[in-house]
Amino acid sequence: MKSPAGKFQGGFSLIELMIGMLIGVLVSVAAISAFVSHSRTVFHQMSYNQASEDISEAYAVLSRLIMQAERDTIEVTESSTATSIVFALPEGFSVWPNANQKKDDPGFTRNWVRIAWTNTGDQANKITIANAVEGGLGSAQIFDFAGAGADNSTRITGMSLEDDGEEITTYLFNISGKAFARDQIDGTDSAKGIVVGGRILPRN
């Protein structure tokens, strides 16, 4: 075909079109890959931040309880799969989950608390807390305090309360956990570890 000026005008050839399409596909694949990688990184970082916050808050609350514990009532039972800490709080001390009671309620005469962690059974990877009056926790209601065993979120991997052996007994208290994140793209799980700990001086 000639133009009014008498010169030939040509369009794109089939090969040029195919090359252009291939370049467009490659650019699109690279952009999608970068987006997926960024989304995965953000998601995992959010899971890690949430787990860090969960474990730090659990440590803060439980360590405050142990600081208020009557020293001669603290009993720690530990194994490779579980830890149980039982202790009494002072008379009149209002302790969750009995916080809905009034301060003059006889229920606050003496509060016994059990903090427990296990990596087996129905309560796997959770910290549970229970309390009762005048010792004995058999009838106390147990609450899940931190961690989760079924879904892909914060999981507690260990809890310890160790006598440091000093003349004035203090305890080394640690909580460890992992942030479990399930990749929404390929369904795989990943985990990052977190450890929070410190030294605690109970009452009297």
Image: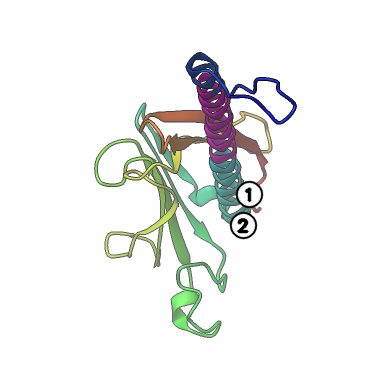
**Quick one: SS at disc 2?**
helix
Q: Nearer the viewer, residue 175 or 93?
A: 175
- Looking at the image, how many numbered discs can be counted on the residues? 2
The amino acid type, in three-letter code, at marker 2 is Gln
Q: Position of residue 93 (x, y in %)?
A: 57, 70
Q: Position of residue 148 (x, y in %)?
A: 39, 46
Taking the magenta stretch, the answer to whether it contains residue 30 is: yes
Taking the magenta stretch, the answer to whether it contains residue 40 is: yes
Q: Position of residue 64 (x, y in %)?
A: 62, 54
Q: Identify the residue at image location x=45%, y=39%.
A: 156
Q: Relative to 36, is 134 on the left or the right? A: left
**Crowd tier of the residue under label 1, counting other residues whose Cα lies within 10 Å: few below 14, some 14–19, many 20 or above:** many
The residue pinned by badge 1 equals 202
| Residue range (magenta) | 21-45
Q: State the quadrant of the N terminus.
A: top right
**Quick one: SS at disc 1?**
loop
Marks 2 & 1, CB-CB < 8 Å contact = yes
The residue pinned by badge 2 equals 68
Which secondary structure type mostly characterizes the magenta part of the structure? helix
Q: Relative to 136, is 99 on the left or the right? A: right
Q: Nearer the viewer, residue 202 or 157?
A: 157
Q: Identify the residue at image location x=68%, y=28%.
A: 3
Looking at this view, name the residue that lies furthest to the left: 121
Q: Is residue 175 visible?
A: no
- Above-or-below relation of 182 to 135: above
Q: Identify the residue at image location x=56%, y=74%.
A: 92
The amino acid type, in three-letter code, at marker 1 is Pro
